[in-house]
Image (cartoon, rainbow, N blue to C red):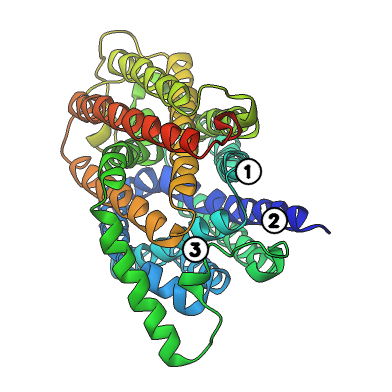
């Protein structure tokens, strides 16, 4: 197998592993608040929104140390251990207890920071300027396939149900736990980074990961990785991209946790309201996969860079927000177990609700594939710290969004995303123009990104 084939193999295994883990985790996040609402009349009292807020809050803080962890133990082992913690969090729902639920939320927040930093490092090490766009798209499409499989099961298993029984809950979460563990084991198939380098090719992670296994050198690399993270945090490009990243965090919270809860709370959808949560997740996944495929795999034919893709993403999202505002009742995010009988500005339509799910997924893929691409291009030599900062900003904004989702009506959540999305698009354009100018200055072909 040629060095380039080995790199592509690593990217595919990375994507498939994440697909399994996030089939479990994203399905869990999509249905968590609905499941917990049905539990809150028992001895269990908790909030899926609060749990997710804890996860992303700890996630954001842990990104300050995750490059050091990856530097010490390596990206492969980092991802394996993190995958185990994801599985443990999902397993808590089999027999929920509030203390275990919130404790697991803390640990998965730490694991998520390490997992995504290691993923960014692995993606960058196995890419170059000519393949980073393609590899970002391949990874993103495989990752977001996770939204399809788990939610397809939810759609059929919960069809016609107005309440989720203990048996239904246990069946779903046992299956999701096993799926997560399968994804974790697959990380062992990733070839070591030094084996994927062509002769004479510089290892972009060498400065961070090093070759020595001595405790002293590991500590030095950990400190160096931490210093790099702090230094990169105050660069002009990172500060500008942080606004775009903040928007991805807000809308991540909305499509992965809030919107499914909204659909499940609309009584006018009839007996299909709970199964529609699964169908919504499926169409979010279809949008994500379509976007990842088109804007990643076909990136070589894109003569205009990343900006048109991001522009498409924000337009698609604004259309989705407009339709959701008209279709979904304002109190849907915070409705009680009985749901809501309110009407927004039109009679709630299942078709419009599911179409909006597709638009949310498509727009999200536009932003994330291009952010992964531009970070891998700009920071090929500092991939772990750069991706750690990316996840730090994204996760802290997701944590804030999950927190206010406990209290804010739908209209205010949509307004916040519109404002941040508008400014995030402008800042991305600014960085992309600078990246294009830098590439032209190096006499490179910009269309190959």
Looking at the image, do the residues carrying marks 1 and 2 touch, with CB atoms under 8 Å apart? yes
- Residue 331 falls in image quadrant: top left
Q: Is residue 407 above or below residue 276?
A: below
* Viewer-side residue, 44 vs 373: 373
Residue 381 picture location, percent across and down: 47, 59
Q: Is residue 197 visible?
A: yes
Residue shown at the point (58%, 65%) measured from the top left: 203
Depth check: give the residue in front, 232 or 187.
Answer: 232
- Whether residue 300 sits left or right of residue 356 in the image: it is right
Q: Secondary structure at mark 1?
A: loop
- Whichever of callouts 1 and 2 sits on the residue coming sooner in the sequence is 2
Q: Earlier in the sequence, mark 2 or mark 3?
A: 2
Q: CA distance from mark 2 to mark 3?
A: 15 Å
Residue 414 in the image: state x and y as whole percent. Answer: 25, 26
Front residue (pair 69, 326): 69
User: Compared to 180, does 393 lie above or below?
Assistant: above
Q: Quadrant location of residue 310?
A: top left
Which residue lies at the image location 71% right of the left edge and 69% below the top edge?
Answer: 195
Q: Which mark is residue 131?
A: 1
Residue at label 2? 7
Determine the secondary structure under disc 3: helix
The residue at which mark 3 appears reads as 118
């Amino acid at each position: 197998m040629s060095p380039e084939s080995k790199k592509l193999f690593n990217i595919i295994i990375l994507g498939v592993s994440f697909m399994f883990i996030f089939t479990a985790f994203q399905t869990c996040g999509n249905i968590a608040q609905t499941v917990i609402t049905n539990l809150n009349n028992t001895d269990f009292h908790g909030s899926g929104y609060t749990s997710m807020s804890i996860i992303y809050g700890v996630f954001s803080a842990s990104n300050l140390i995750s490059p050091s962890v990856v530097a010490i133990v390596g990206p492969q082992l980092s991802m394996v251990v993190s995958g185990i913690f994801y599985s443990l969090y999902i397993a808590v729902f089999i027999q929920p207890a509030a203390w275990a639920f919130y404790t697991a939320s803390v640990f998965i927040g730490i694991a998520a920071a390490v997992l995504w930093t290691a993923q960014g490092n692995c993606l960058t090490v196995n890419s170059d300027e000519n393949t980073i766009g393609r590899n970002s798209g391949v990874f993103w499409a495989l990752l977001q396939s996770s939204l399809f499989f788990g939610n397809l099961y939810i759609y059929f298993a919960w069809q016609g149900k107005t309440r989720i029984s203990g048996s239904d809950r246990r069946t779903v979460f046992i299956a999701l736990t096993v799926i997560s563990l399968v994804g974790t084991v697959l990380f062992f198939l990733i070839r070591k980074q030094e084996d994927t380098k062509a002769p004479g090719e510089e290892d972009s992670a060498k400065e961070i990961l090093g070759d020595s296994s001595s405790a002293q050198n590991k500590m030095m690399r950990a400190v160096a990785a931490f210093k790099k993270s702090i230094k990169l945090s105050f660069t002009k490009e990172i500060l500008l991209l942080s606004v775009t990243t903040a928007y991805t965090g807000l809308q991540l919270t909305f499509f992965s946790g809030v919107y499914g809860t909204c659909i499940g709370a609309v009584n006018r959808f009839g007996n299909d309201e709970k199964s529609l949560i699964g169908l919504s997740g499926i169409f979010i996944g279809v949008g994500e996969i379509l976007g990842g495929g088109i804007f990643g795999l076909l990136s070589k034919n894109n003569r205009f860079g990343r900006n048109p893709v991001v522009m498409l993403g924000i337009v698609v999202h604004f259309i989705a927000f407009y339709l959701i505002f008209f279709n979904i009742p304002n109190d849907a995010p915070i409705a009680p177990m009985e749901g809501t009988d309110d009407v927004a500005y039109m009679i709630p339509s299942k078709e419009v609700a599911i179409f909006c799910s597709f638009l949310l997924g498509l727009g999200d893929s536009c932003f994330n594939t291009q952010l992964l691409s531009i970070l891998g291009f700009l920071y090929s030599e500092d991939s772990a710290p750069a991706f750690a900062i990316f996840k730090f900003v994204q996760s802290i904004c997701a944590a804030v969004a999950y927190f206010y989702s406990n209290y804010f009506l739908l209209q205010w959540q949509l307004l916040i995303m519109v404002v941040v999305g508008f400014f995030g698009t402008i800042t991305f354009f600014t960085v992309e123009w600078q990246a294009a100018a830098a590439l032209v200055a190096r006499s490179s072909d910009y269309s190959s990104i």
